Image: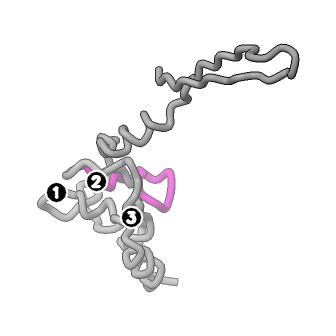
Amino acid sequence: MGKPTPKAEVMRYLKSQHYTDAKDFAGECEPVVMIAKGQSVQGTCKYGTRVDYILSSSNSPYKFVPGSYLVLSSKGTSDHHIVKVDVVKVNSDPQENLIKKQREPRQKVVRITHSNPSKSIWKINTTGHTH
């Protein structure tokens, strides 16, 4: 059948939605697949086209490590090559930490005193304590 024509519509859409392509973290040179016989092939499949992707949404706590994207030969085990990239979890925003601390459960100390036994009137004193 020959080399299929790559379809780019899905990738264009995902990039418009601010997804990051791991291939942008390949370093200074184009990633190349090294085949056992010493050939070098661009792309992620046997036709030399790119059909396998690793993407990350803009709000992900994980970011790609610069220079870590790589395509490795599957050495005849598949018609797709191995695509890999290293990721690291980024420190969360200090403002998020403040919000999380404010959401911790608060303990209230409640004192109930029987102020007038004949009329069953109860007085409640509430003091808020945060732990």
Q: Main secondary structure of the magenta part?
A: loop
Query: Which residue does the image show at 40% across and 53% down from the upper left?
Result: 60
Of callouts 2 and 3, the N-terminal one = 3
Q: Is residue 81 above or below residue 14?
A: above
Describe residue 89's horizontal placement relative to residue 124 as left or right.
left
Whether residue 97 is visible, yes or no, is yes
Label 3, residues with CA under 10 Å away: few <14, some 14-19, many ≥20: many
Label 2, residues with CA under 10 Å away: few <14, some 14-19, many ≥20: many
Residue type at mark 3: give it: Thr
Q: Is residue 5 above or below residue 100?
A: below
Q: Is residue 19 above or below residue 6?
A: above
| Residue contact at pointers 1 and 2, CB within 8 angstroms | yes
Q: Which residues are magenta?
A: 68-82
- Give the secondary structure at mark 1: loop
Q: Is residue 116 above or below residue 88?
A: above
- Residue 69 is tagged as 2
Q: Position of residue 77 (x, y in %)?
A: 50, 51
Mark 3 highlights which residue?
A: 44
Q: Position of residue 33 (x, y in %)?
A: 29, 58
| Residue contact at pointers 1 and 3, CB within 8 angstroms | no
- Residue 54 is tagged as none
Whether residue 55 is visible, yes or no, is no
Residue farthest to the left? 28
Of callouts 1 and 2, the N-terminal one = 1
Of callouts 1 and 3, the N-terminal one = 1
Mark 1 highlights which residue?
A: 27
